[in-house]
Image: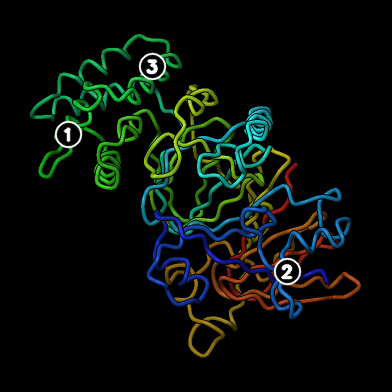
């Protein structure tokens, strides 16, 4: 087989949406948050091979049965494709680079910490660069912004706080004229110190953003602060968020985060691809394990000039995001067949993207596949075929369905819909 349907059960994290993933997958909502759909062979939640045999088996077992045919260089996939349904802010977090991940994983193994222990920081020896592409509007905190912008917002909040604004003035003054990386680190160590002055600063921010108050900060920043304070009252991550870019992504826009960059996704639906790792060091905005000293040790405090990453138009209907890491590349293909659209067709415009036609679609898109590919259809219905292969297989893939495609001849996409395809990087 070269075209293999795969499936998985969404992970039920507290920040998930109750209805977004069920709507995409065509399932009934359970009433519980459904946060992430994992499509890969990561041991934390490997996808299952669907429609194959009476005995269920995972993508891990498929690759182990014939690693040269189904794996990458005779081993597991170096990437993991996900769909995120963000109903509430995720934890403020950072991921290690390769050396830090290998060192941390070995150290926790040596200390006898079980890999599935709640207090485990390093669950594998891999780094975790990641790329997120919005399916709906997505908001995020993404990398450190300029220190001058942080100072400006601290002063605006201080001026708007009816009581206690003085502590915010002091926090702003400490940043003025300081070396940026050292200043950010000092601010974070102060925010996580748990001192009385930190509590006073948190109260001042809440006072400044209260109902009816309009501090002179960007409306997106104000909305972000109010949402964080509502979901995580008293969390120092609210203060730390002032160091970070606030990004609002339209559908199709992307952010890329390399190792050691602080970030948090706040809301929306998105496709995400990353190196095959589950290593997360959390800084706040969560009930999960937090290790502030280790998080600060691996964090890089330099400014991120532009969090957004533009896609590259490869061909008609085909866009690629290539961040220059060996682990992954992400493609988005859009195909459109006029016979499938409108009244009496296979599906209506409303089944595409928010009732809109697929901008930039082509009648057929061809994607090279010299390495394995994992794909998911996010809108409409797409026929996936490999006419040049010995078996000449084809699969009719509806919205929410996923395929694993073994390495080989190019993949042809027709029909009417949108497909995201993850494969190895450069």
Which residue: 43% across, 46% down?
265
The Cα–Cα distance between marks 1 and 2, rounded to whole angstroms, is: 55 Å
Quarter occupied by residue 151: top left
* Residue position for label 1: 215
- Mark 1 and mark 2 lie on one chain; the one further toward the N terminus is 2
Frontmost of labels 1 and 2 is 2
The answer for how far apart the CA atoms under marks 1 and 3 are is 25 Å
Give whichever of 158, 290 is nearer the camera. 290
> With respect to residue 36, does 225 lie above or below?
above
Say left or right for 292 vs 367: left
User: Label 3, on which residue?
Assistant: 186
Which residue in the structure is indicated by mark 2?
57
Answer yes or no: do the residues labelled 2 and 3 have beta carbons within 8 Å?
Answer: no
Q: Is residue 100 above or below residue 59?
A: above
Q: Is residue 392 left or right of residue 273?
A: right
- Residue reaching furthest front? 112
Mark 2, Cα crowd under 10 Å, few <14 / some 14-19 / many 20+, is some
Q: Look at the numbered disc 2 and give the secondary structure of its residue.
A: loop
Q: Quadrant of residue 219?
A: top left
**Image position, residue 263 (x, y; %):** 46, 37
Of badges 2 and 3, nearer the viewer stands 2
**Which is nearer the N-term, disc 1 or disc 3?**
3
Give yes or no for contact between labels 1 and 2 (Cβ–Cβ under 8 Å). no
């Amino acid at each position: 087989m070269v075209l293999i349907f795969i499936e998985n059960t969404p992970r039920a994290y507290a920040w998930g949406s109750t209805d977004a993933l069920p709507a995409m997958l065509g399932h009934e909502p359970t009433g519980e948050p459904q946060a992430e759909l994992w499509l890969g062979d990561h041991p934390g939640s490997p996808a299952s091979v669907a429609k194959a045999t009476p005995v269920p088996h995972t993508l891990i077992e498929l690759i182990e049965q014939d690693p040269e045919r189904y794996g990458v260089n005779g081993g597991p996939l170096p990437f993991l494709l996900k769909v995120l349904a963000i109903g509430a802010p995720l934890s403020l977090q950072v991921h290690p680079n390769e050396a830090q991940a290998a060192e941390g994983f070995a150290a926790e193994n040596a200390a006898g910490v079980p890999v599935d222990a709640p207090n485990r920081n390093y669950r594998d020896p891999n780094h975790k660069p990641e790329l997120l592409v919005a399916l709906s509007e997505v908001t995020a905190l993404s990398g450190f912004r300029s220190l001058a912008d942080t100072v400006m917002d601290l002063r605006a909040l201080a001026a708007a706080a009816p009581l206690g604004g003085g502590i915010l003035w002091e926090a702003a003054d400490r940043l003025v004229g300081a070396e940026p990386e050292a200043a950010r680190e000092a601010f974070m160590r102060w925010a996580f110190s748990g001192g009385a002055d930190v509590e006073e600063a948190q109260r001042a921010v809440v006072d400044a953003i209260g109902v009816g108050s309009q501090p002179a900060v960007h409306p997106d920043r104000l909305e972000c602060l109010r949402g964080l304070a509502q979901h995580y009252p008293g969390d120092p991550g609210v203060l730390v968020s002032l160091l970070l870019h606030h990004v609002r992504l339209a559908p199709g826009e992307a952010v890329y985060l390399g190792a050691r960059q602080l970030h948090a996704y706040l809301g929306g639906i998105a496709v995400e691809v990353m190196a095959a790792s589950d290593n997360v060091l959390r800084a706040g905005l969560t009930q999960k394990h937090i290790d502030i000293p280790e998080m600060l040790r691996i964090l890089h405090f330099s400014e991120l000039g532009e969090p957004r990453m533009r896609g590259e138009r490869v061909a008609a209907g085909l866009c690629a995001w290539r961040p220059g890491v060996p682990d992954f590349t992400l493609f988005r293909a859009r195909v459109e067949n006029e016979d499938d659209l409108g009244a009496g067709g296979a599906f209506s415009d409303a089944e595409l993207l928010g009732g809109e036609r697929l901008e930039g679609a082509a009648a057929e898109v061809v994607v090279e596949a010299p390495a394995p590919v994992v794909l998911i259809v996010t809108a409409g219905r797409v026929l996936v075929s490999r006419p040049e292969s010995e078996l000449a297989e084809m699969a009719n893939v509806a919205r929410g369905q996923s395929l694993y495609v073994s390495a080989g001849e190019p993949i042809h996409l027709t029909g009417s819909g949108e497909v995201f395809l993850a494969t190895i990087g450069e």
